[in-house]
Image (cartoon, rainbow, N blue to C red):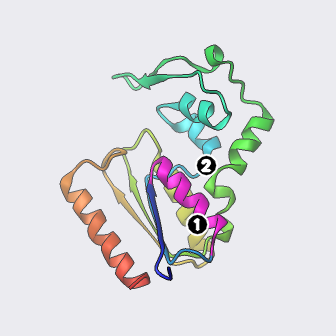
Amino acid sequence: ETRVVMAGGSHGGFIAGNLLGMFPDRFKAGIMRNPVVNLVYNVSASDIPTSTELNSCGITTGNGFAGDDGIWQGIGRREAGVRLTEEKLQKMYRASPISRVGKVQAPTIIIIGLKDTRVTNHQGQEFYYNLKSRNIPCKILAYDDPHAITQVHFDYDAWMNISLWLEEFVG
């Protein structure tokens, strides 16, 4: 129980970031891979923008996918009845890990894909710079790859660095 680590990627990174901030004394280390840390930012930067809006604003009727051209295909804001009001944007921010980053105490390693269009690398960078500014042990690994970190040598390097991070901070 003294060696608990929080880890997650993409929306799992969203959960990890939130839990690291909500329970700062609980975790010995954090691992976040291409994390969604700011829903407000993700709405305008992701290749699946309506997914963020629909999920975070409680609308469940939207669906779709990013087409081969990178343009979102399917039900959008208007069709799903989603309007980004100030109230909804505030709700999205309050639900985001970035609103809790000031409470994070766990040493955190963040892995990002520089070609990620699903959760742009700026998300992980935003969390990293916030931790760094408070002298929380943190490290960011950036790979010239998309969201899934598909190249074997990048994936290997990430897992080796995660292993070393855990050895250093968890034992």
Region of the chain picked out in magenta, as a range: 9-24
When asked about the image quadrant of residue 104, the answer is bottom right
Magenta stretch: residue 122 in it? no
Q: For label 2, count other residues whose C-alpha is less than 10 Å away and answer few (under 14), some (14-19) or many (20+).
A: many
| Kind of element beneath mark 2 | loop
Q: Secondary structure at mark 1?
A: helix
Q: Position of residue 154 (x, y in %)?
A: 25, 58
Between 158 and 15, the one nearer to me in the picture: 15
Q: Tell me what residue is drawn at x 49 percent, y 31 percent.
A: 48
Task: Using the image, tell me which numbered label, if any, was put on residue 20.
Answer: 1
In the picture, the quarter occupied by the C terminus is bottom left
Q: Is residue 12 magenta?
A: yes
**Which numbered dot is residue 107?**
none
Q: Amino acid at mark 2?
A: Asn
**Residue under the point 53% across and 37% down:** 45
Q: Residue at x 65, y 16 (%)?
A: 78
Horizontally, residue 114 falls left or right of residue 19, namely left
127 lies above or below 47 = below
Real-space CA distance between mark 1 and mark 2, rounded to the nearest whole angstrom: 15 Å
